[in-house]
Image (cartoon, rainbow, N blue to C red):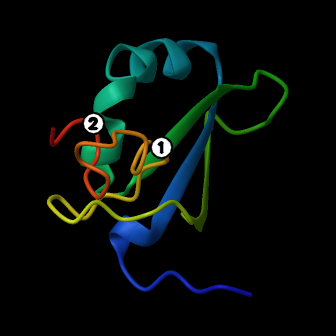
Amino acid sequence: KELIGGALDANVILHAKKDTYALLELIASELRFLFLSSEVELHLNNDQADELVITIDTQNAPKCIRCWQKRDEIGHNSGHPEICDRCI
């Protein structure tokens, strides 16, 4: 089992009911910065009892050498193989 060594090693998974989901969806692209993590997944789930359920998992994507975010797109740009799209 892998351990999370730091915040940027985390993948935050949010399961929210309709109203909370609608609010979070407005800032979905910024949630990873709010949670200080490399990735945040937002899912609509009206079947759960709680308004918001948060799960943390490990993020196994490569790390950007500039911002240290772990992103799947790293390595896709041959001109900048070690940095993420945001840092290019």
* Residue highlighted by disc 1: 40
Q: What residue type is disc 2 on? A: Asp
Look at 28% across and 32% down and name the residue there.
Answer: 30
Residue 67, image x and y in percent? 17, 58
Closer-to-camera residue (76/38): 76
Mark 2: secondary structure: loop
**What number of labels is visible?**
2
Closer-to-camera residue (87/50): 87
The local crowd at label 1, few if under 14, some if 14 to 19, many if 20 or more residues have their Cα within 10 Å, is many
Q: Nearer the viewer, mark 1 or mark 2?
A: 2
Q: Eyeballing the image, is 70 above or below 13?
A: below
Look at 39% across and 25% down and name the residue there.
Answer: 28
Mark 1: secondary structure: strand
Q: What residue type is disc 1 on? A: Val
Residue 11, image x and y in percent? 52, 57
Q: Where, quadrant-wise, is the N terminus in this rendering?
A: bottom right
Closer-to-camera residue (47/68): 68
Which of the 4 image quadrants contains residue 88?
top left
* Residue highlighted by disc 2: 85
Q: Is residue 7 left or right of residue 58?
A: left
Q: Is residue 77 left or right of residue 73?
A: left
Closer-to-camera residue (36/88): 88
Residue 47, image x and y in percent? 85, 26
Look at 65% across and 23% down and name the residue there.
Answer: 17
Give how far apart the Cα atoms at labels 1 and 2 are. 17 Å
Look at 54% across and 13% down and name the residue there.
Answer: 19
Q: Which mark is residue 15?
A: none
Q: Eyeballing the image, is 32 above or below 57?
A: above
